[in-house]
Image: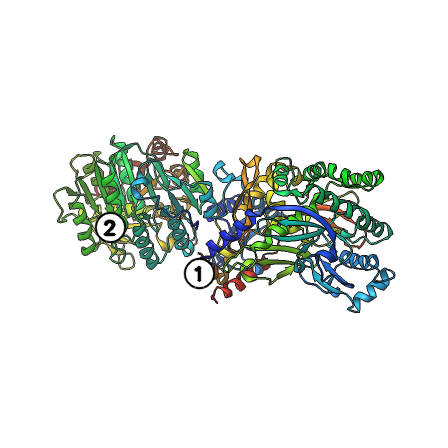
Amino acid sequence: MDPEQDQIRGQPDSLLAAPPRVINVGLELFAENLASQGAQVVHVRWSPPAGGDARLAGLLARLRS
Amino acid sequence: MSVIVNEVRRSTYLDSIVLMRISRQLAELPGVEEAGLVIGTPANKEILREAHILGPDGAKAEPGDLIVALRAKDSAAAEAALAEAKRLLEHPEISGAPALENASRTMRAAFQRMPDANLALISVPGHFAAAEARKALAFGLNVMIFSDNVPIEEEMALKREARERGLLVMGPDCGTAIIGGVPLAFANVVPRGDIGLIGASGTGIQEVSCLVARAGGGISHAIGTGGRDLRAEVGAIATLMAIDALEADAATRHIVLISKPPAEAVARLVLDRVARSRKPFTICFLGARDLALPANARCAATLKAAAELAMGRAAENGPTQLSLLRADGGKLVRGLFAGGTLCAEAQIVFRQAGLAVASNVPVPGAAAIADANRGHLMIDLGADEFTRGRPHPMIEPSVRDRPLIDALADPAVGVILIDVVLGYGGHRDPAGHVANVINSHDRRPLILASVTGTDRDPQPRDAQVQRLTEAGVIVAESNADAADMAIRAIGG
Amino acid sequence: MQSIDQANHEAQRRIIDGEPILVDVVPASHAIPALGDNVILHAGPPIGWERMCGPLRGAVTGIAVFEGWAGDLDAAAAKAAAGAFAFHPNHHFGAVGPMTGMTTKSQPLLVVENRTFGNRAYCAINEGLGKVMRFGGNDAEVLDRLRWIRDVLGPALGRALRDCGGISLKPLIARGLTMGDEMHQRNVACSSLLLRQLAPALARTAKSNAELVACLDFIGRNDQFFLNVAMAMGKALADPARNIEGSSVVTAMSRNGTDFGIRVSGTGDRWFTALVEMPVGLYFPGFSARDANPDMGDSAIVETIGLGGFAMAAAPAVVGYVGAGRASEAAAFTRSMAEIVVGPNPAWTIPAMDFAGVPTGIDIRLVVETGLVPTINTGIAHREPGVGQVGAGVVKAPLKCFEEALVAFAETMGLE
């Protein structure tokens, strides 16, 4: 979380004003489809935090800020 | 003697659709009998075990690992298949599209690359979805959560937090949205227009948007709220925010609400908000006919009626086409649906006609399957009991093959009802797949289908309809019409 | 108390705000008073003789002979085994050293001063390519060269640097990045720029023409001369970022041929170690992976400040050379490292990435979350002492270091 970036930018009104600019997290298929339509998309090749290690993931969640 | 080989790749994760594609490619290699690539969760290991491809190595895999499992006719074929698996796993660009060449590994890095992003589309396993959604909200993004199996407490917390920030959370379990003309997840390509949709159901949005499109209208935006938004605990947060947004949207003239009938208190909450709006509404609480509605709202009991009312036409009872079709032999209707809401709509049409019907997801007035005698059956093949560890029928139509073949061979079945759903996210040729199954089996039942889609979809509708027609399927104008035609065909 | 993100921004800012100047060359005992007889500083986290790898033992015995603490290599080895030498990491005394990283009292050390914060860091002078002590070389030729460096080159460089008022390194690095250097495996541009700046001062302060020729020739023939300057600079820039409460930024990464160690700002001077990994790369003719020594050196300080493997996109030629892939894939390495850092360094930009700044400030939280570990460009030593470099490649920092650091960091934050 960037301390400089805390203004609210994505109100639903502004969501509807123009084609969405999407960050896709998960299924590649959705990013492929958006890209093929010429939509603005960045894909995140997600994997479970800490490789699935629950203890480390728990620590990470609490160290988030 | 077949050999089973497993290879475990530690701390490796790939999304389920990518794994399915690779599994399918491996299964087609010479000498390979069965192949599966899954993340090493207990549920997935069970699936491998049932498919007789789980070996001792795979059994020891952990949830953070990837299991490559296969059964081949001999070791040579198995080794060759493993080598091919390695090649496919190590060269993701083989399946990659331009958007993916520069994929990020974290939302944080993605946001740095696209600082003006305004929507996060989240389709990670349900256990992790809320945390990702929370990150997105912290970045100031609206969120669409495609993932299901998210605890309702998380949904409540997320939607409240989002509301504080003036952000919209669509979902969880939100399969469909169309924002600014862009289809998101499972959605169709429809013309822009002045009808806004707000739906707790993905296929409900798909059907209404396509019917509007084929009637010459267009969609401003279709906002998905997720299947539980109208539960008392969630309190319609997304629905109410969506109404606000479409109210403020200059392009939207008419708003359609689509969902199952909500509890009284939530319905009141929503309808009070509708009453305060300047814009006209069509309220489709599926199956509900007699709602106390404000002056600016009309009631549609079916998706078809909702599209008609939104277009300013009177809702018709009965199918648009005249149908002289009659079923030979069997007297029972067997509906096999990929879309849960389409399954519900078919049940509603039957109930409105006074016919008894049973389903694995019964609407009020319909029976659960366990209770029913042999009567009319409507099966939602996308329900949890069918999709645990298996792909959804909209992605993988072969899930419907076995029930379809059984119905074709069942002398008591006079009419088969199916939905064919097109659009992004769906199979590239669902009609072709169904036609192949039908063509390879003798059949006596009448087969009725609806095709939810448009000609601008990746699977253009006309060609899909033609494929079905050539296979002897009668294609109705809408899912509601198909159900109506089924009733008439059995003399009801 | 500030948040972790704020603490990390502070750490990264300190790295970026540093103003490193190469000011002098001095005998090690002047820079580091603790360097008396029988004190040997080495690369990497703390280690004892028993666990030292072949090249490191070779270097230890060689430097002991060089300093006159043993008559020959065997005597030196016996002394070491008997515990007569005090071994310490370079990092514990404000120094760094490449590969075996030997630092002892009479060697001349490059001095880099961070004008912004007033701190200094030290590194020995690069011996050149081939059979050298940093790869465990310890024969007469190696020791003779060290004597020449001690008696001629070191003092000459010191005079020249004092004469010209020091060399400002930040702009020199910025230029090098536009010329194909990444400052770990590839330093030819920076080495050339440095020599160009130093040559007049060397000429002015040379004791004789013959000495001048020898110095210019020695430096000019060594494409990697600048590596040691970059390393001292790296430590001078990273040290002010140490000990910031609540910061999860890495302040040092280092290897001794057996263990890989990291230090994290918020956990102070604790080392988090794991066994080093084997480099993956390309080998000189006649050598293969069988001959390779495990990863070694304090040079990972270069990656710690955003250069080396992190700046791979600036040096596409390196990618093929180190066997890491195609030149077109160089940017992917840098993009990958950008996922695990606080942010880019606006002073050091890479033209091929639309002038994106090098990724700076490794955050252990991001490393553990993504499993993306720092990628380090490195030379590969022969596992037998005295043979020298046999290849070059990339090596990954072990994830275990970061996982253990995360647990310890969480404890300092009052969790667990």
Residue sitting at x 18%, y 38%: B309
Amino acid type shown at disc 2: Lys
Q: Quadrant of the N terminus of chain C?
A: bottom left
Disc 1: which chain? C
The residue at which mark 1 appears reads as: C1
Left or right? Give the position of B79 relative to A58. right
Residue sitting at x 26%, y 48%: B239
Q: Which mark is residue B260?
A: 2
Amino acid type shown at disc 1: Met
Front label number (1 vs 2):
1
Q: Is residue B5 visible?
A: no
Residue sitting at x 65%, y 39%: C181
In the picture shown, does residue C7 fall above or below B301? Answer: below
CA gap, disc 1 to disc 2? 50 Å
- Front-most of B267 and C315? C315
Number of numbered labels in the structure image: 2
Residue B147's spot in the image, x, y percent? 38, 51
Residue C237's spot in the image, x, y percent? 60, 50
Residue sitting at x 66%, y 60%: C92
Element assignment for label 2: loop
Disc 2: which chain? B
